[in-house]
Amino acid sequence: MNHGDIWRESIRIDRDRQRELEKCMDEYDKHIYRPKLKQLQDDCGVLGHKFVFKSFGPVGNPWYICEYCGFTKVEDI
């Protein structure tokens, strides 16, 4: 085994771990986390999001994120 093999195996086991974590959290996210987050984001939208620039998207459009609730938006250029 060389450094390249170790690096590739490290990536593989991290990916496998992430996949297992996602499976474990899927039901919770679907029924609890996402609905609660959406409600918070809707409430924040009523008050007025505070958007800050996040990055440029894959086609060069600017992406913004609300500092309070994490809601994102993309503006057309």
Image (cartoon, rainbow, N blue to C red):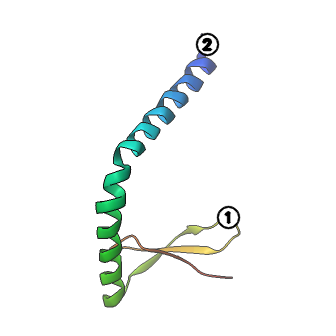
Q: Residues within 10 Å of mark 2 (few under 14, many from 20)?
A: few
**Amino acid type, mark 1:** Pro
Image quadrant of residue 1? Answer: top right
* Label 2 to label 1: alpha-carbon separation: 35 Å
Q: Nearer the viewer, residue 41 or 51?
A: 41
Disc 1 packing (10 Å; few <14; some 14–19; many ≥20): few
Viewer-closest of 19 and 45? 19
Residue appearing at x 60%, y 81% in the figure: 75
Q: Which residue is mark 2?
A: 2
State yes or no: discs 2 and 1 in contact (Cβ < 8 Å).
no
In the rendered image, the vertical position of residue 16 relative to residue 43, given as above or below: above
Q: Is residue 58 left or right of residue 9?
A: right
Quarter of the figure with residue 22:
top left
> What kind of element bears circle 2?
loop
Q: What residue is rendered at 34% in x and 52% in y?
A: 27
Residue 44's spot in the image, x, y percent? Answer: 32, 82
Asked whether, in this view, residue 39 is left or right of residue 18, the answer is left
The residue that disc 1 covers is: 58
Q: 30 or 56: nearer the eye?
A: 30
Quadrant of the snapshot with the C terminus? bottom right
Residue at horizontal 65%, vertical 74%?
Answer: 61
The amino acid type, in three-letter code, at marker 2 is Asn
